[in-house]
Amino acid sequence: MKAMRRHASGKRKSWIDKLDAAPLPQVKPAPMDFAGMKKGEVMLIPSPRQIEAFMRAIPKGSFIDVKRLRRELARQNGAEVTCQVTTGFHLRIVAEAAFEAHGRGEPLEAITPFWRVLDEASPTSKKLTFGLDFLRDRRREEGPA
């Protein structure tokens, strides 16, 4: 059985804690062929904070897909590719932390607009603890710019 990560206080880590404790980004050669990357390609392993900053820069009413996010992050960091697996994990951390902050009283305008990247078809969206309705509602409210 998988051990749950716990805060120093003994409580389970919140998504915000996970966002705050996440590792820094790295740029290094891909160690092997996987997830559409070729061994030796210069690969960005993004941090959740990088993904969060990228999402916050997307204008209201604009939407991009995860593939474009990965391409842009790679380009911005001097890499050829961005790790698909790590990006998926970190997209979830960012989305869950934003939803958690909203649940604690942060207004929508103050949280990371993860719905500008994630949509109903995104594999990450299907794993969100809060379901798809929040995501659908935000995308419908913003609509095209």
Image: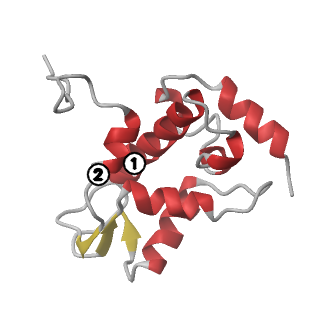
Q: Residue at coordinates 33% horizontally, 40% vertically from top-left?
A: 17
Of circles 1 and 2, the one toward us is 2
Disc 2, SS: loop
Quadrant hosting residue 29: bottom left
Q: Residue at coordinates 54% horizontally, 59% vertically from top-left?
A: 67
Q: Is residue 143 left or right of residue 104?
A: right
Q: What residue sits right under mark 1 in the picture?
A: 90
Residue 117 vertical placement versus 79 (above, below)? above
Quadrant hosting residue 82: bottom left
Q: Residue at coordinates 39% horizontally, 70% vertically from top-left?
A: 81
Q: Is residue 69 left or right of residue 81?
A: right
Q: Amino acid at mark 2?
A: Ala
User: Nearer the N terminus, badge 1 or badge 2?
Assistant: 2
Q: Nearer the viewer, residue 114 or 101?
A: 101
Q: Residue at coordinates 80% horizontally, 54% vertically from top-left?
A: 61
Q: Quadrant of the N terminus?
A: top left
Q: Position of residue 122 (x, y in %)?
A: 56, 40
Label 2 packing within 10 angstroms: few (<14), some (14-19), many (20+): few
C-alpha distance separating marks 1 and 2: 9 Å
Judged from this view, the residue extending furthest toward the top is 1
CB under 8 Å between discs 1 and 2? yes
Q: What residue sits right under mark 2 in the picture?
A: 22
Q: Amino acid at mark 1?
A: His
Q: Is residue 78 left or right of residue 73?
A: left
Q: Position of residue 98 (x, y in %)?
A: 53, 40
Q: Nearer the viewer, residue 103 or 121?
A: 103
Residue 82 vertical placement versus 119 (above, below)? below
